[in-house]
Image: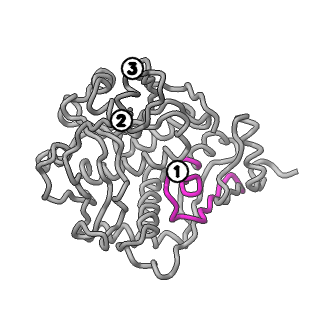
Amino acid sequence: MLTNNKMRYDKTKILELLKEKNKYVKKLPDKVDFTIENKILKVVINEPTNNMQSNEAAFEGWILVLKTWLPSVIENVVLDFKIIPDNLKGVYYGKSSKLSHYNRFLYRIHNFSKMYPDWFSVEITKKQIISDFMEFLKNNTTILNPSSKERVDKLNKNSKERQADSNKSNTESDIERWFVFQDGKDLLYSTWNINKEKIHNQLPVGVYYKEIATDRTIFSGKKSAIDFWGIGEDEISLHLFELKRGNNSTIGVISETLFYTFILYDTCISQTPLFDYESRDQNNSDTKAIINDYKKFDKLYAHILSEKYPTLFNERVVKLIEDGLSNYNIIFDRATYDYSKKSIKVFKDFCVSPN
């Protein structure tokens, strides 16, 4: 009989192994291929132009989960992916939403490779594709779009009614506004020492080639934004928050948070930034705050703030994320909040929802 080192596991067998460890697991992503051979997990992303939150594209989250939960059969990971159609090859900006998602996908692979150089690699035939894209970013002017207007606490009638009646369900937008504009900012201050006057919501993460224009889009900026963010009382630390309500938190939240983290790192922290802020529209308080008089922040904190987490997203996955981001001196944590009790708890392990 073959030893574990020589065993080959297909997707069905991998799922069986995972179910033995976690009874809540129902399936692996439908359009992602997984195999394990000689303790090497091979992951093939067949739809790299999908939204990074979706199971089909959230490779970071699923790789971290599988490596954490199946350590006896996985030591190294190789990522492969389907190349996008010929009409988009070698083109790095334009109006295509698929191109924007694909560009983000390449950028995410680059960052993940830097997080885990000891055990993660890319299929050798695809390495040049990623290298070419990163060279394009490094050698050209790429601009992160600022907010188009000053953001204020605009509560509609239904939002006010929900606030008045704690038994009514609040939307994610309601809770986001509560943290940014209302009493929730006191919790952010007491938990992470964030300046209550420098908490802002919906930071756009669209990236453009040379100027902000639809036909120059590199990373989509229409609805893509960090939920909320703030600056520490020390004035040198930058905090980003990915907010999830109810059972909305999936494994994709890991991929989403890492993407936002590196966007801010490559704009506001790195001494050799990839992205610049356009100088216009600095009358908005959030744009002024993030530009920070064109001085770099010294520290970056990435927080996931959710009511519930998938059971696969346990404390060992958190530790693996912490280890990877430590290569960039980025601090990561996850917390749960209770809107009705007006509380936040930063925790190590109290996942309560099935995957």
Badge 2 is on which residue?
176
Give above or below for 278 relative to 268.
below
Q: Is residue 84 left or right of residue 274?
A: right
Which secondary structure lies at badge 1? helix
Badge 3 is on which residue?
342
The outermost residue toward the front is: 157
- The amino acid type of the residue labelled 3 equals Lys
Badge number at residue 60? 1
Residue 3 magenta-drawn? no
- The amino acid type of the residue labelled 2 equals Glu
Badge number at residue 112? none
Give above or below for 340 relative to 15.
above
Residue 292 appears at what percent x and percent y?
Answer: 15, 45
Real-space CA distance between mark 2 and mark 3, rounded to the nearest whole angstrom: 13 Å
Residue 289 appears at what percent x and percent y?
Answer: 17, 43
| Region rendered in magenta | 37-62
Residue 129 appears at what percent x and percent y?
Answer: 46, 72
Q: Quadrant of the C terminus?
A: top right
Q: Is residue 116 left or right of residue 303?
A: right
Real-space CA distance between mark 3 and mark 1, rounded to the nearest whole angstrom: 32 Å
- x 20%, y 37%: residue: 236
Q: Is residue 156 left or right of residue 99?
A: left
Q: Evaluate if marks 2 and 3 touch, with contact meaning CB atoms under 8 Å apart.
A: no
Which secondary structure lies at badge 2? helix
